[in-house]
Image (cartoon, rainbow, N blue to C red):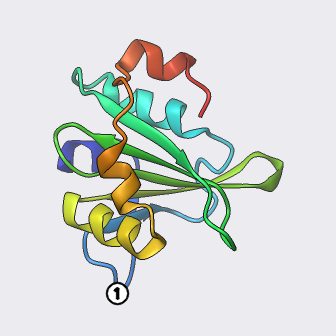
Amino acid sequence: MNEHRDVFQWKEIRGCPGRYTLKSGEHQQTPPAQLLSAALELERLQVNATRHEVQGKHPMVVSQLTDGGGLLTYCKPAGVYVHTLNTTSGLERKTKALGVATHCAAHTPPPLDASSAIQTEL
């Protein structure tokens, strides 16, 4: 996951070990599939992406990397995205806290590769 963290300027979320966010305002207009495509071109990683809606929260996309960890993106109104990069344990803790951990583990859609991630609108 370290090589993915180096693609953009991520900073650790205070009090949340294994979870990182982009600097304020950076890539807020970039959908998760496009953000991931830059990292996916570094090596042929695969991503399992699922969309979730939790009452009282913005819709989110959980993109699990097959080599561990993943990207959790909150989809706010007007095309604004808040991306968080997570280690395996960080992603497990957060999705469990949101109540989507069981769904993530049980539902694994076909993986996206770098070429399809660019075209996929999540």
Along the line of sight, which residue is nearer the eye, 43 or 100? 100
In percent of the image, x 33 and y 32: which residue is there? 47
- Establish if 20 lies above or below 119: below
- State which quadrant residue 120 falls in: top right
- Establish if 115 lies above or below 34: above
Locate residue 45, reporting x and y percent.
Answer: 24, 27
- Establish if 50 lies above or below 76: above
Specify whether 91 is left or right of 77.
left
Along the line of sight, which residue is nearer the eye, 120 or 52? 52
In percent of the image, x 61 and y 38: which residue is there? 31
Amino acid, disc 1: Gly
Q: Residues within 10 Å of mark 1 (few under 14, many from 20)?
A: few
Specify whether 35 is left or right of 74.
left
Residue topped by disc 1 = 15
The reply to whether residue 47 is in sight is yes
Along the line of sight, which residue is nearer the eye, 56 or 22? 56
If the image is split into quadrants, where does the C terminus sit? top right
The reply to whether residue 70 is in sight is no
In percent of the image, x 61 and y 65: which residue is there? 54
Locate residue 23, reporting x and y percent.
Answer: 51, 63
Considering every residue shown, the one lying at the far right of the view is 78
- Establish if 85 lies above or below 24: above
Determine the secondary structure under disc 1: loop
- State which quadrant residue 46 falls in: top left
